[in-house]
Image (cartoon, rainbow, N blue to C red):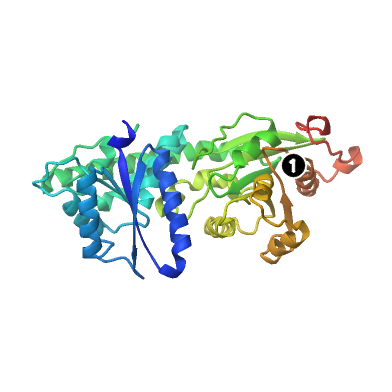
Amino acid sequence: MGQQDNKAILIAIGNPRDAAETQEHLDELSFLAETVGIYTIEQFVQNLTHPDARFFVGKGKLSEILDFVTANKVTNVIFDDDLSPSQLRNLEKEFNPQDSEGPTVRIYDRSLLILDIFLWRAQTAQAKTQVELARNQYLLPRLTRMWTHLERQRGGTGTRGGSGERELETDRRNIRNQIDILKEKLKKIEKQRITQRKSRGNVVRVALVGYTNVGKSTLMNLLSGSGVLAENKLFATVDATVRKVTFGNIPFLLSDTVGFIRKLPHHLIESFKSTLDEVREADLLLHVVDLAHPYHDNQIEVVSKTLQEIGAANIPTILILNKIDLYKKQGHDFNMEEMKGYYREMGYEKVIFVSATSNENIIALKQMIFEEVKQKHLQLYPNFLKDGGYEFSPWPLNEEEL
């Protein structure tokens, strides 16, 4: 399907005083849409303090949007916030009236778009099951007569569409049955994962966390020597990837987990609890930040709140400010000690600036990780010092390779 056949408009509400932040949210939403092959041709912002209860935007703005959609044959309308079931029903009637001869307009909110991406990205049976469960739970109260989302998904659960109440109820019953089946399937998978995690109980565990697309997978490859997918795309990593790493004479497990994002769907967090156990049960978190992103402090806050939600806020953390090379190229003044002080005031005691692409400060980062892992390793193996102690080595990256 070409770009012209999969055009989208984005819709948000905002306050003129927060125009820059609203625009940043819309830019991210556009990037999310592009991840699944939907291309933005226009953005609409209405200055409201709260979404309109019926249509999210006011009737006048809706009329303007409808005219644009018709004139430009837009097939996707994407809202930056979640739509209530009643809002979605009302919008479906407006964008897809019974007598319409134009193309069907698909309506997304931010959560549905994120769920779409997760379904596209999921590779393992566990991740696919988690995403399908989350999506079905999210969509169940939002079924409308223009029920096309499940039919359209890659690898999704097919359900029969229909234009009448009888067909809708059949769809609802099918979705409820699917939810029950997926929950049972997930329970079996989670039992297997629990057994696997128990077998790792005698090894120190380190987990990479951060906003989506900040360079976690690139850093994972540097630290572990593995070939984890690293792309300039949102949610390139959905499945948790675990690698055994050895620095000097200390082995530990390093996991790369799904990136966080603002307004992450609640059902997705619930369904991904077992995957997020890689974070919850870690001995050390490596919180990776894209320093070059203009709103990286907001992204740090989103990640911190998500860690609180999943019960991982008190795990020792190293704040890794990545892409320092790009940050400098942008012309920013860079005073390392002053910036470290700023982040320490935010509660991050251990802070380091690196570039995963140019290898800047990677040896220093490995040394910092080594010192943290060493403390936990000594708790697990108190007699280790008697056997010769600890020896740091930056494998798989040494000074000659820089």
Residue at x 83%, y 30% (from the top left corner): 400
Give percent across and percent down for residue 41: 34, 45
Residue at x 61%, y 29% (from the top left corner): 227
Give percent across and percent down for residue 140: 27, 49
Residue linked to disc 1: 360
Give the quarter of the figure containing the C terminus: top right
Q: Residue furthest left?
A: 99
Q: Does any portion of residue 86 appear in the rendered image?
A: no
Number of labels in the image equals 1
- Up the image or down, 180 lies above or below 2; here it is below
Judge by depth and name the residue closer to the eye, 37 or 111. Answer: 37
- Up the image or down, 53 lies above or below 234; here it is below
Tell me which corner region of the image, top left, top right, bottom left or bottom right, holds residue 383: top right
Give percent across and percent down for residue 273: 49, 48
Judge by depth and name the residue closer to the eye, 264 or 324. Answer: 324
Residue at x 67%, y 41% (from the top left corner): 201
Residue type beneath disc 1: Glu
Give the quarter of the figure containing the N terminus: top left
Relative to 323, 380 lies left or right: right
Q: Residue furthest front?
A: 331
Rate crowding at label 1 as few (under 14), some (14 to 19) or many (20 or more) other CA atoms within 10 Å.
Answer: some
Q: Does any portion of residue 197 appear in the rendered image?
A: yes
- Up the image or down, 4 lies above or below 265; here it is above
Judge by depth and name the residue closer to the eye, 312 or 50. Answer: 50
Relative to 188, 56 lies left or right: left
Give percent across and percent down for residue 64: 23, 58
Tell me which corner region of the image, top left, top right, bottom left or bottom right, holds residue 60: bottom left
Tag 1's secondary structure? loop
Judge by depth and name the residue closer to the eye, 167 or 237. Answer: 237
Relative to 253, 280 lies left or right: left
